[in-house]
Image: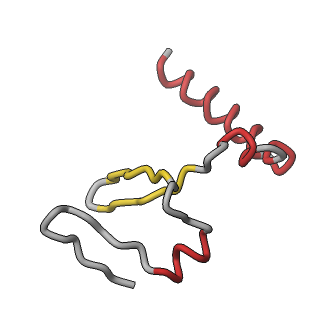
Amino acid sequence: MRTKVTTRGQVSIPSRIREQLGLGPETVVEWVVEGDTLRVIPIPADPIRALRGSGRKGTVGRLLADRRRDRGRDG
């Protein structure tokens, strides 16, 4: 899907994407630039609640392993 940036720098999110991700008028999004790529990430209204239970799927273990690896690079 494509949209245009307006002269005021605004972008519309297509309705199909808004519905799929549950985005509403008060949804906050984060803009992340990675090289020549732009990612738009919706931020949940309650990020703690959104992450609840994710540790059971190995997310916390991977995060801790990444942190240990990063610390090894610093030392």
Residue 62 is situated, as x and y percent measured from the top left of the image, at 71, 41
Residue 8 is situated, as x and y percent measured from the top left of the image, at 16, 63
Residue at the extreme front of the image, as rendered: 25
Q: Is residue 46 above or below residue 22?
A: above
Q: Between residues 1 and 37, which one lies in front from this camera angle?
A: 1
Horizontal relation, residue 58 to residue 64: left or right: right
Q: Between residues 65 and 9, which one lies in front from this camera angle?
A: 9
Q: Residue at x 66, y 43 (%)?
A: 46
Residue 63 is situated, as x and y percent measured from the top left of the image, at 67, 37
Residue 35 is situated, as x and y percent measured from the top left of the image, at 28, 54
Residue at the extreme top of the image, as rendered: 75
Q: Between residues 47 and 60, which one lies in front from this camera angle?
A: 47
Describe the colour scheme in one phrase.
Answer: secondary structure
Q: Residue at x 26, y 64 (%)?
A: 10
Horizontal relation, residue 60 to residue 25: left or right: right
Q: Is residue 53 above or below residue 24?
A: above
Of the 4 image quadrants, the one containing the N terminus is bottom left
Q: Residue at x 65, y 42 (%)?
A: 47
Q: Between residues 36 and 26, which one lies in front from this camera angle?
A: 26
Q: Residue at x 22, y 71 (%)?
A: 5
Q: How many marks?
A: 0
- Which quadrant of the structure image shows residue 49? top right
